[in-house]
Amino acid sequence: MKEQDEPVLASTNITPLQQIMASSAGALLTSLLVTPLDVVKIRLQAQSKPFTKGKCFVYCNGLMDHLCVCENGSSKAWYKAPPGRITGTVDAFVQIARNEGVRSLWSGLPPTLVMAIPATAIYFTCYDQLRDLLIHRMNNAETACLIAGATARLGSATLISPLELIRTKMQFRPLSYKELTQCIQMSVANEGWLSLWKGWGPTVLRDVPFSAMYWYNYELGKKWLCQRYNKLEPTFTISFTAGAMSGSIAAVVTLPFDVVKTRRQVELGELESLKNSPKRSSSTWKIMYRIISENGFQGLFAGLIPRLIKIAPACAIMISTYEFGKAFFRKLNNERQLKVL
């Protein structure tokens, strides 16, 4: 059918405010469901290889990365030493809930919500608006999705980058807002306004290709599943499945840049927390070369399974909730129009 060959325009009968509400709901639900997985992962990592003073680790729940610096065997951020010997993932959930309370499974959630929700709302809303605009001007819908995905991620990453820098500085050591302001002013005075976008390069190298591939494969997968099950519009299950598959593919392809970004964050964190640490080049390509020299080519794909375990459900939950929210508002708007008529 012709309707199945043409993608449903996301903004049809949907206002930008409703798109923002749908994407915010998706970000909230994703954070609530995926955060406990990373809390458990960090506890298991710390048990097998305890974090020493000045050691950094990256906390990521599928939406945002957080750099944690350990002090005196623990951290001032979102890490606590395991209360007892943990034998596995299920046991970790049980012990954390029993000894520290169920809320401890969502450690680190507030800073995620503060930044992830506005960043996600900007990203998804921009993608839908750009995608619909490009589809009207281009003959190839999949290419329009690829360009819109890359452009939306580039824009959102650029807008959020200064906030990421501020958050990272506050994670390295306790800073009052006055001290933080002075630190930023000094950085701008010495290095210019571009200093607020430090770390933008590795983030863009990872996230822009991820976004382009994710949306391209998602739209293809969604269209194929709709045709296979004879659906005019994607169901929650179709969106969930297409989101998980496309997120997994993009996660595998962009993993080397994720490894580089993580290494760069950790090295800068240790340099900041331990002033006598030797300074090393933070160039993306030099870090990549150093990883290959130390660990071989396979070092660029370290952590593949943990990344897939987080990214696949996070992408699936986020996109299916977003699509469900848009369908809800579309139906609501149609009912309102019928009442007016």
Image: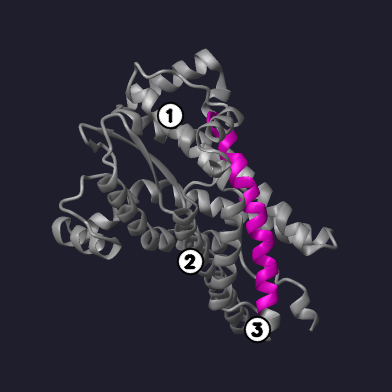
User: Real-space Cα distance between discs 3 and 1?
Assistant: 63 Å
Q: Secondary structure at mark 2?
A: helix
Neighbor class of circle 1 (other Cα within 10 Å; few <14, some 14-19, many 20+) is many
For disc 1, the marked residue is 267
Which residue shows up at 44% across the image and 44% down it? Answer: 65
Residue 19 is one of the magenta-drawn residues: no
| Residue that lies at the very extreme toward the right in this rendered image | 139
- Quarter of the image where the N terminus is located: bottom right
| Span highlighted in magenta in the image | 197-225
Q: Tell me the number on the disc at residue 122.
A: none
Q: Nearer the viewer, mark 3 or mark 1?
A: 1
Looking at marks 3 and 1 on the same chain, the residue that comes earlier in the sequence is marked by: 1
Callouts 3 and 1 close, C-beta under 8 Å? no
Q: 199 or 139, which is in the foreground?
A: 199
- Residue type at tag 3: Leu
- Residue type at tag 2: Ile
For disc 2, the marked residue is 317
Q: 214 or 266, which is in the foreground?
A: 266
For disc 3, the marked residue is 341
**Residue 97: image x %, image y %?**
20, 61
- Residue type at tag 1: Glu
